[in-house]
Image (cartoon, rainbow, N blue to C red):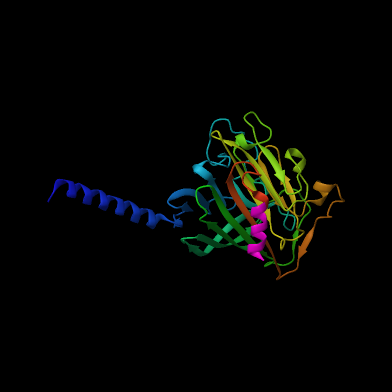
Amino acid sequence: MNPRLIVFFQVAIALLSVSAFAQDQAGVTITREDDQLRITVDGKPFSNYHFKNTPRPYLYPLLGPGGLHMTRHWPMKDMPNEEHDHPHHRSLWFAFGSLNGVDFWSEGAKAGKTIHQDFITIESGKKVGIIKSSNQWVALDGKKICSDVRTIRIYRTGSEERMLDFEITLRASEGDLTFGDTKEGMMSVRLAETMRVKGKVAQGHIRNSEGVLDGATWGKRAKWCDYYGPVDGQTVGVAMFDHPSNPRYPTWWHVRDYGLFGANPFGLHDFEGKPPGSGDLKVPAGGSITFTYRIILHKGDTDQAKVSAKFDAFIKEKN
């Protein structure tokens, strides 16, 4: 055979192999290991869902556009120029500081734990990957306070952003369940140090749906909040959307200038100076309460990422 034809066929076969490999990797893939689920999007790492031997399940790392690390590494990993405050701030997590008076927010000596029970669904897909699990909220003395079923949907959205929905239903499975009036919670992210508003390497900004900026966003109500800044020289951000079906929408935001970023509809005493207990919410025995959030890891600042328009699309999609 003509040597040129041989080379042509070899190149064609190689290209077909690369194309087939790319197609095999297309979509969201979730792989189970002993203590975590590994999540990739189009073959590239996105995050790991840690569920074993931890005070609560959490997602770490959180890799945004270009594979940039958008959350703080500590306490999972020790890296230069990172503050070692608040060891319970584990990348992306859901927790609350007072459920029937038990602290499930901190990792202090008297704190409770959210214990993974089982996976209901682990599903990879071309457009979306799904993690659905059941968990028990247990006090230090072993008493069960409540249970939850949570569903995380990770979407294939291209290389410009990463997107997930976090839905959690807490059940008053052990009797009446009271969410106490505290700022400590709830759907939360701890961002990379360079994305902070204040700090030794901080260059970030905060903006909410009402146009409030930076440190003034703390304790304010808003439909969404966006926290953006540089990572490895590129401006990226994390936007969190509160859904209208959530209790007390639009939520208050426990968003700090040192990189903590959380939605919390219960801390009225702290956020607005109302009498203690004003933010309490009781779920009767046998009842349940559901929270739904969307989190987008995007390129650019709030305007460049079209955060407001993406929130509007989220509302239409979920209604």
Residue plotted at (57% across, 53% down):
163
* Vertical position of residue 295 compared to residue 66: above or below: below
* Image vertical order of residue 307 relative to residue 179, above or below: above
Most extreme residue toward the left is 1
Q: Residue lying at the far right in this picture: please name it.
A: 275
Residue 69: where, in percent of width, then height?
Answer: 53, 41
Quick one: which residue is furthest to the bottom in this view?
A: 286
Residue 140 seen: no
On the image, the x and y values in percent for residue 224 come to: 70, 51
Question: Is residue 140 shown left or right of residue 67?
Answer: right
What's the residue at 58%, 47% (across, down)?
297
User: On screen, 175 above or below 309?
Assistant: below
In the image shown, does 147 or 38 lie closer to the viewer? 38
**What predominant SS class does the magenta segment belong to?**
helix
Question: Residues in magenta?
Answer: 309-319
Q: Is residue 34 left or right of residue 213?
A: left
